Image (tube, grey):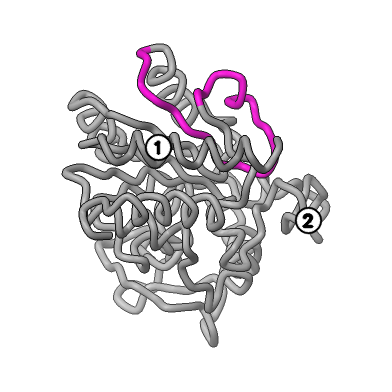
Amino acid sequence: MASLEIEETLEAVARHLARARRALFITGAGISADSGLPTYRGVGGLYNGEHTDDGIPIETALSGDMFAHHPEITWKYLAQIERTCRGAQPNAAHRAIATLEQVLPGVLVFTQNVDGLHAKAGSRNLIEIHGNLHELCCTACDYGEYIEDLAGRELPPTCPACGAVLRPNVVLFGEALPEAAMDRFLDELDQGMDIVFSIGTSGVFPYIAEPVLWAAQAGIPTVEINPEPTRLTPYVRYYLPLGAAAAMQGILDRLNRHGFHGI
């Protein structure tokens, strides 16, 4: 895409946002790439489809079934992911979305990420559909805690109240999505959206792709921000082949230029 076309797309998206009352941001691992985090399956990812050190796919190592039978294996790779994420800070994309939440009547973030960076940036109307790696809960009792990192922790960590294994409050492969979170998301969608963004996600999962496709079919402006085209690209109205930070900062700059709500 030529630079002029990108400029025109950024301007068009900013104008839609300036008129919007409710905006949905669906985000995946790519939004955190500018914070130094790997996208796991994408270019430069942590695993890139390769087997783990234990000779099994990462999806198997991080599955609910593996955790039930061999929690030490699941925790080995959860800890590796946590070390990779440790110290990461929100980037311009996270901060731009949090800023928009302060000035638009309704902004919802629906994220696949477990890194907690949206919350750290200040987003409050947030659904972390896959959970948060920093929240631990006991597999046997009601104990729970929030951790900054796993440094110095025995793995797998055990519950100080009953001695059972702790697990992070995340959805492992093969596990169901949290019903309450999905119900809340559907309730928000029922209220309507004026613009829908897909940022840094390949849209593999139906619950990520379908809201974008629904919006596109309904004539609602849809925006995809991703350096590489995805299966969603042919269906969205606006495609920005940029990193999330550059794209969102570009949109925010144009809103600023137009004096939108004093951003």
Q: Is residue 110 above or below residue 53?
A: above
Give SS at disc 2: loop
Q: Is residue 153 above or below residue 88?
A: below
Q: Is 258 or 88 nearer to us in this picture? A: 258
Q: Provide the residue designation for mark 1.
A: 177
For disc 2, the neighbor class at 10 Å (few under 14, some 14 to 19, many from 20) is some
Name the quadrant of the C terminus.
Answer: bottom left
Occupied quadrant, residue 36:
bottom right
Q: Residue at x 40, y 37 (%)?
A: 177
Q: Main secondary structure of the magenta part?
A: loop
Occupied quadrant, residue 23:
top left
In terms of sequence position, does the residue under pointer 2 or pointer 1 come before the other? Answer: 2
Q: Position of residue 134 (x, y in %)?
A: 42, 68
Which label was assigned to residue 197? none
Q: Is 258 or 185 nearer to us in this picture? A: 258
Q: Position of residue 192 (x, y in %)?
A: 23, 25
Q: Is residue 143 above or below residue 225?
A: below
Find out whether residue 232 is within the magenta segment: yes
Magenta residues, as a range?
Answer: 218-237
Q: Residue at x 39, y 63 (%)?
A: 95
Q: Residue at x 54, y 84 (%)?
A: 151
Specify whether 75 is left or right of 116: right
Specify whether 9 is left or right of 226: left
Which label was assigned to residue 52? 2
Query: Mark 2 belongs to which amino acid?
Result: Thr
Find out whether residue 85 is within the magenta segment: no
Task: Report how many numbered discs are placed on residues in the image.
Answer: 2
Occupied quadrant, residue 204:
top right
Query: Mark 1 belongs to which amino acid?
Result: Leu
Give SS at disc 1: loop
Q: Is residue 168 visible?
A: no
